[in-house]
Amino acid sequence: MLQRRLFPIILQQFYPGQQETCLLSGIPRALQHGHRYAWNRSKATAAFPDVRERTLIAVKPDGVQRRLVGQIIQRFEQRGFKLVGLRMLQASEDLLSEHYCELRKKSFYHSLVRYMTSGPVVVMVWEGHNVVQTSRTMVGHTNPAEALAGTVRGDFSLHVSRNVVHASDSVEGAQREIQLWFKAQELMDWDCCDKSSTSEK
Ligand code: IDP
Ligand code: MG
């Protein structure tokens, strides 16, 4: 009974059906969606802490140019995450301005967009337990000079303006970015035959 009531809530969490814009990015989520959002979220996450948590990982143009796509995919596969979406594309300035909407006022914003449009990117959606936080750790500090060895940025890059890879920084951010880069039908639902070996669930 409880599960029947919670599943639609969870589906709404992960597939809200509407592409959000950044126009509301300065406003707290609970206010954007009303109190029900906050209530639903806390109920849903309490019952199913990480059901189908997904994140957006992108190999940036420098990573593609340097033929690092395979090694980056391998790290996420090796860790036990499940690949549910993959696209190679030349990103437009419009898409990047949505993707990096929080950085539009930064001094480096225009050079960031130039860098991100300088060649194709490979964008992926990965799924699994705590994938957002774990992938941030795997990717490493924004500035490669501070990134630890063993992280993607710590192993493959030198400078903050060429840091090889993007990873969403929160569950909400991941949902927004996934909707920006992928249509719902481009994401694959499939069962990993080894899922009981990588997680209890
Ligand atoms: P993140 O990629 O680790 O989440 P953000 O602060 O969200 O870091 O910045 C987005 C991207 O903007 C960085 O990955 C990097 O490519 C670029 N960036 C951030 N800070 C600088 C900077 O000081 N100079 C140049 N580029 C920067
Ligand atoms: Mg970021």
Image (cartoon, rainbow, N blue to C red):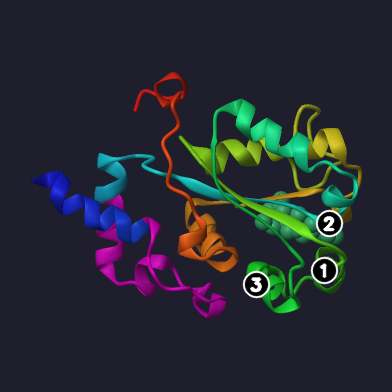
Eye-nearest disc, 3 or 1: 1
Residue indicated by mark 1: 117
Judge by depth and name the residue closer to the eye, 70 or 16.
70
> Which dot marks residue 101?
3
Residue type highlighted by circle 3: Cys
Note whether ligand 1 is within 8 Å of mark 2: no
Residue at 80% x, 61% y is 120
Residue type highlighted by circle 1: Thr
Residue at 82% x, 68% y is 117
Mark 2 residue crowding within 10 angstroms, few (<14) / some (14–19) / many (20+): many
Residue type highlighted by circle 2: Pro
Q: Is residue 171 left or right of residue 141?
A: left
Residue at 43% x, 41% y is 190
Q: Which residues are magenta?
A: 14-42
**Coordinates of residue 200 in the picture (x, y in percent):** 36, 23
**Coordinates of residue 86 in the picture (x, y in percent):** 62, 52
**Coordinates of residue 14 in the picture (x, y in percent):** 39, 56
